[in-house]
Image (tube, rainbow, N blue to C red):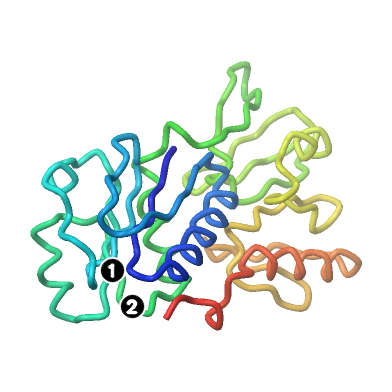
Amino acid sequence: MRAVVCMRSAREGETLCQAIRLWAEMVCLGVEVSAQAPGEAIPEEAALLLWDMDGTPALPVGVRTDRSRVLLLCSSQPQAAIESYALHPDAFLSKPIRMEALHQALERCVARCWGDLERVEVLCGGARRRIPLCDLLWAESYQHGALLHTSLEEIQTRESLRDLAARLPERVFLRCQRGYVVNLYHIRDIGQTSARMTNGAEIPIGRRARSDVLEAYRRSRRIGEDEAPR
């Protein structure tokens, strides 16, 4: 997937490119991200476009009418939010853009690129299931296999948690305890003995694993508010 960031400030553009790369890495989506200067032609293959409405040329007609492309608009002017309605954006972001707000906007776009998401294949009841990695919240040892928790269902497989974990990307999935593998993307908070997930579940964290999990969690959100573009 190709993503293009067009901002008035080159520094803003590069910072946002980095944030989109981080998000893509966490949702296991292959994305080629590049920044371009206002006025440059938008590549036709760009499936995601982040466009600065402040001091940049108006969106080309083709971009305004192309509903297949994910369009994110931003501006420092409150009136621009109203004006953006006519462009049918997938999200409008107020400047300075907070990284949390950007990631939330990108999360809403996951369904638009569902077919491009990396997946893991598991054997379940004699049938093979291909699960998007970003939809796998955590997995745990269960009976003689593993139990996978997704946003919609639980999937039981006879494959051991150890073998399953070996097939998951280490940059996203961590062994937080002997019987659990957790998806960093779905962690919302880390306490002394557990991690709170996006669905509200509390996953236990072993004492020895806590420091590694906490460091990986912070690293996965390494673009903080102090680094957000202004």
Q: Which residue is mark 1?
A: 74
- The answer to which of marks 1 and 2 sits earlier in the sequence is 1
126 to the left or right of 166: left
5 to the left or right of 171: left
Residue drawn at point x = 62 percent, y = 21 percent: 125
Residue drawn at point x = 13 percent, y = 56 percent: 87
Q: Amino acid at mark 1?
A: Cys
* Residue 177 in picture, x, y percent from top left: 83, 57
For disc 2, the neighbor class at 10 Å (few under 14, some 14 to 19, many from 20) is some
* Residue 120 in picture, x, y percent from top left: 62, 32
Element type where label 2 sits in the image = loop
Residue drawn at point x = 38 percent, y = 79 percent: 96
Spatial distance from mark 1 to mark 2, Cα to Cα? Answer: 6 Å
Classify the position of the C terminus by image quarter. Answer: bottom left
**From this viewpoint, which residue is outermost toward the right?**
208
- 37 versus 126 height, above or below: below
Q: Which mark identifies residue 221?
A: none
Q: Which residue is mark 2?
A: 95
Query: Is label 1 in contact with label 2 (beta carbons under 8 Å)?
Result: yes
Q: Nearer the viewer, residue 215 or 132?
A: 215
Classify the position of the N terminus by image quarter. Answer: top left
